[in-house]
Amino acid sequence: MAEARTPTFARERRGIALAWIALLALMLTSLGSAYLKLGPWNMVAGLVIAGIKVAIVAWLFMRLRAAGALIRLAAVAGLGTWGLLLALSGVDYATRTLTSAAVQRPQQLLPVQAASAPRHALQ
Amino acid sequence: MTAATLARQSADETPDPDTGKLGMWVFLASELLFFGGLFIAYLYGRTHFPAGWAAGSRRTDVVLGTVNTALLLTSSAAVALAVACEDDDRRRRWTARLLALTAGLGAVFLVLKGVEWHAEWHEHLVPGPAFALPVAGAQQFFALYFVMTGLHGVHMIFGVGALGGLALGRARERPWAGARQIEVAALYWHFVDAIWIFLYPLLYLVDRHG
């Protein structure tokens, strides 16, 4: 029995080692890209690299690759629900102007409004 | 149906091997929404106050942040290996050691995070009347920074406790530290790692070239 399982363990160990190396390499890529002047693409690069890293963690370390349909469904449901939250909140905030609360005087918001840049000016 | 019949039935029914894992995945989905609201708040701040976000992020300690990221990625690989060892009869003696290594790396992460917070406190980067950066939005960045890293830190403390306990239990061959419990705890640890994977570029790497 142990002999039969050894190749499976060896394959899994090799996968974990390769994934670990890839994760560290991606981390350094993310760090390096932050020092390049890419405009809005700095944020895109950071998030895309983070997405790839999380996919590696979920697929290999969390064993989604070998998981059944029900577990995969639970994982996707969480992500999908967060996507809905993001989309609906985004619609709200993107269309709302900055106004003072009942406890604030309008001039208190002036420096904040002055610093509030156009929406497309991502760093 | 008599009580004896019920007792015999429940003794016959062994739970599905995926039950614990499915329960943890459902819990992690709810945790994603817990952190997800903060990520949305972050996105709002970054798109509306890019100058404040850039000024704030440049004051975070990118060296410690990167070291901590490497520690967490390594700890995730260690706990994944612990689960693989537990599944293999001949490697099972390594499980407890790898779990202890994972908990140890997590503890080092928490110490380094404490060092960072201590320095930030002394540099007046905690939002309040004496805040150091005169850029609109920078206080909001640091407010989110402390809430997100603090919440993540609380999850880390639970994870270190769970994996440290399982390492001890596995070394003493306690029945509550079996393969299923270890795999479920490992899922939680990977999730905490995944949250940090996103926190790293969002908190430490904004406008580094500026």
Image: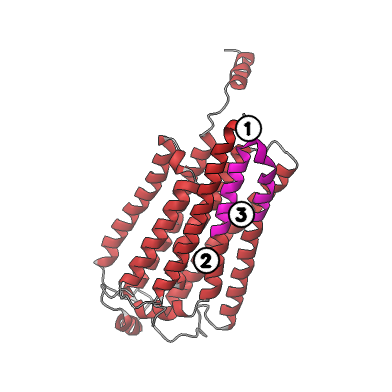
Please say if A101 is above or below A7. below
In the rendering, which numbered label is found on residue A2? 1
Cα distance between the residues tagged 2 and 3: 14 Å
Circle 1/circle 3 CB separation < 8 Å: no
Q: Residue at x 58, y 58 (%)?
A: B156
**Chain at tag 2:** B
In the rendering, which numbered label is found on residue B149? 2
Please say if B149 is above or below A98. above
Write the start and end of the magenta stretch as one range: B73-101
Q: Amino acid at mark 1?
A: Ala
The residue to which callout 3 is attached is B158
| Element carrying mark 1 | helix
Which of B69 and A27 lies nearest the eye of the viewer? A27
Which residue appears farthest toward the right when viewing the image?
Answer: B172
Mark 2: few/some/many CA within 10 Å (<14, 14-19, 20+): some
Residue B172, quarter of picture: top right
Does the rendering let one see residue A23? yes
Discs 1 and 3 lie in a common subunit: no
